[in-house]
Image (cartoon, helix red, strand yellow):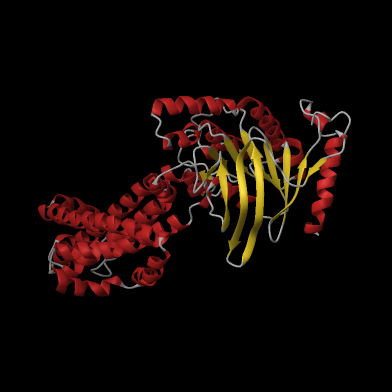
């Protein structure tokens, strides 16, 4: 970004927003908006509290399990849909429905099915993340250059090698799906825990809200945002390393 | 071809009978639904020769090549390689693809070694052999580059090295030069002629360029479209072992080009 011909660091826009927040907060207009400095102060408080460490542990556990499950189920399902037209016809409608549906509405049903605990949160993360992984994998598998498969056949590649070739050729799309799934999974874990509200970050949110610790509340939100951005940034980096060939696949 | 000095005209055969056929195409027909892509093709390809399959688009020349490669199943008829009927791709045939079909995630060397890897060769050995052929097609120094770092012509050289490395008897080339620019193409054709001398393989070459076919072929199989049928077989009677730029002005060469053009122009118009 440049301003008046000068290079400005990426983060400077954040500083401006933080300033606006600080000024508005200092007016003490609503209880909901403490000044930004107070939030930053609370950040240390939140980070060092033992309940935060425990909440993060529970949250990460649910997040990683749900996401792992989504990847393990999503990629094979995407392969199936990409390679078998009948399976695609049967499943495509449902996958698209679940992708667009407000999944939060389903969480109470998960609660009945899986109880008020981590399993429900895992299922929520899974449901938020899996469909985009399925669809992106499917798209990747379907858009492989046909000649690449003919090539592997003509040089005597067996089934396993042909599968490996499809996987590698579809890898850029698969990774894009995983990255989007990760971002959606963060939503899933927070929404799941908020609705279950007795475990993890959800319990902390409830605790801070009920005790009017708004600075702590915002600090926690900032932490979660940072976490989600870092995660998607990490996968984005991995994607870039794979992407070097993605743009060249058509030729 | 030995009579080239006297006869500047072209020789036309009605039904080919070659003494040492390596590939025999016997009554091949191919239907795509209701569309007849190929109709009763009978052909023989002699060991060590370069034959072009030439014709306007829609004549089924690529379909025929892919049937010979074992990548497509004919609706009727059979293809025999060294007397054996084929039912799929085989080691004695290697394919060069129009769009190169390189693996974008693999280096030039690994791409060239792909066929050898499929044959179960150890890593060290296949890399050594691939390195030899990468050098032979003129890509020394690019072994560790990736396809997207190469020009179109260079990419096709990798495809050629991959096909040469498996040491097949027959090289099947599907419009290998159509995706590269004109200058690269000419250089490529000259290199192909040279390669043919060195490698002593049988080449089948699909092209839609008359000049290219006349320039590189021992024999040209002319196909006509809708349905794809054998239209003519031409043995260009042009001097070999001369400077390529002189050859392109040779009257035998120009006459052959003209003759082929007049026989296929009715399908184009």
Measuring 85% from the left and 33% from the top, which residue is drawn there? B250
Q: Is residue A208 visible?
A: no
User: What is the number of callouts on the image?
Assistant: 0
Residue B226, given in percent of the width and then of the height, sits at 70, 61
Measuring 61% from the left and 32% from the top, which residue is drawn there? B201
Measuring 38% from the left and 46% from the top, which residue is drawn there? A164
On the rendered structure, is A96 left or right of A125? right
| Residue B193 lies in quadrant | top right
Placement of B257 over or under B138, stated as above or below: below
Q: Is residue B35 visible?
A: yes
On the rendered structure, is B14 left or right of A91? right
Between B179 and A244, which is closer to the camera in this rendering?
B179
On the rendered structure, is B217 left or right of A124? right
Residue B264, given in percent of the width and then of the height, sits at 79, 53
Between A124 and A42, which is closer to the camera in this rendering?
A124
Residue A176, given in percent of the width and then of the height, sits at 40, 54
| Residue B219 lies in quadrant | top right
Residue A182, given in percent of the width and then of the height, sits at 31, 56
Measuring 42% from the left and 35% from the top, which residue is drawn there? B117
Between A61 and B143, which is closer to the camera in this rendering?
B143
On the rendered structure, is B255 left or right of B174? right
Placement of B164 over or under B43, stated as above or below: above
């Amino acid at each position: 970004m440049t301003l008046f011909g000068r290079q400005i660091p990426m983060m400077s826009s954040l500083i401006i927003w933080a300033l606006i927040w600080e000024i508005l907060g200092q007016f003490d207009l609503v209880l909901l908006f403490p000044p930004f400095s107070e939030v930053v102060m609370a950040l240390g408080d939140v980070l060092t509290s033992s309940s935060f460490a425990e909440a993060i542990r529970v949250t990460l556990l649910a997040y990683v399990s749900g996401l792992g499950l989504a990847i393990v189920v999503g990629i094979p399902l995407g392969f199936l849909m990409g390679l078998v037209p009948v399976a695609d016809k049967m499943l495509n409608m449902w996958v698209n429905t679940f992708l667009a549906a407000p999944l939060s509405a389903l969480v109470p049903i998960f609660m009945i099915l899986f109880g008020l605990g981590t399993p429900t949160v895992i299922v929520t993360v899974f449901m938020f993340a899996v469909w985009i992984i399925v669809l992106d994998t499917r798209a990747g598998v379907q858009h492989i250059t046909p000649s690449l498969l003919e090539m592997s056949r003509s040089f005597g590649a067996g089934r396993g090698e042909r599968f490996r070739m499809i996987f590698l050729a579809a890898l850029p799309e698969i990774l894009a799906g995983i990255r989007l799934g990760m971002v959606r999974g963060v939503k899933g874990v927070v929404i799941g825990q908020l609705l279950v509200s007795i475990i993890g970050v959800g319990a902390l949110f409830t605790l801070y809200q009920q005790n009017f610790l708004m600075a702590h509340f915002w600090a926690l939100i900032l932490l979660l945002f940072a976490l989600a951005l870092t995660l998607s940034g990490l996968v984005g980096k991995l994607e870039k390393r794979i992407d070097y060939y993605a743009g060249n696949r058509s030729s | 071809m030995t009579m080239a000095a006297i006869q500047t005209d072209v020789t036309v055969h009605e039904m080919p009978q070659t003494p040492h056929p390596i590939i025999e195409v016997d009554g091949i027909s191919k239907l795509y639904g209701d569309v007849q892509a190929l109709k009763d093709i009978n052909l023989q390809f002699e060991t060590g020769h370069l034959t072009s399959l030439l014709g306007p688009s829609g004549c089924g020349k690529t379909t025929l090549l892919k049937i010979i490669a074992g990548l497509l199943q004919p609706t009727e008829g059979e293809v025999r390689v060294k007397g054996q009927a084929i039912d799929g791709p085989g080691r004695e045939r290697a394919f060069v693809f129009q769009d190169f079909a390189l693996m974008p995630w693999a280096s030039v060397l690994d791409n060239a070694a792909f066929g050898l890897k499929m044959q179960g060769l150890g890593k060290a050995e296949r890399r050594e052999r691939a390195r030899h052929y990468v050098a032979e097609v003129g890509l020394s120094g690019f072994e560790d580059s990736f396809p997207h770092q190469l020009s179109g012509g260079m990419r096709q050289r990798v495809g050629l090295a991959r096909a040469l490395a498996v040491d097949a008897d027959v090289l099947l080339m599907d419009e290998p030069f159509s995706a590269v620019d004109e200058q690269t193409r000419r250089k490529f054709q000259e290199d192909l002629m040279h390669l043919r001398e060195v490698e002593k393989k049988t080449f089948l070459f699909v092209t839609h360029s008359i000049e290219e076919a006349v320039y590189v072929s021992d024999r040209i199989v002319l196909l006509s479209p809708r349905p794809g049928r054998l239209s003519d077989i031409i043995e260009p009677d042009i001097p070999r072992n001369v400077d390529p730029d002189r050859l392109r002005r040779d009257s035998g060469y120009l006459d052959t080009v003209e003759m082929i053009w007049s026989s296929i122009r009715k399908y184009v118009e």
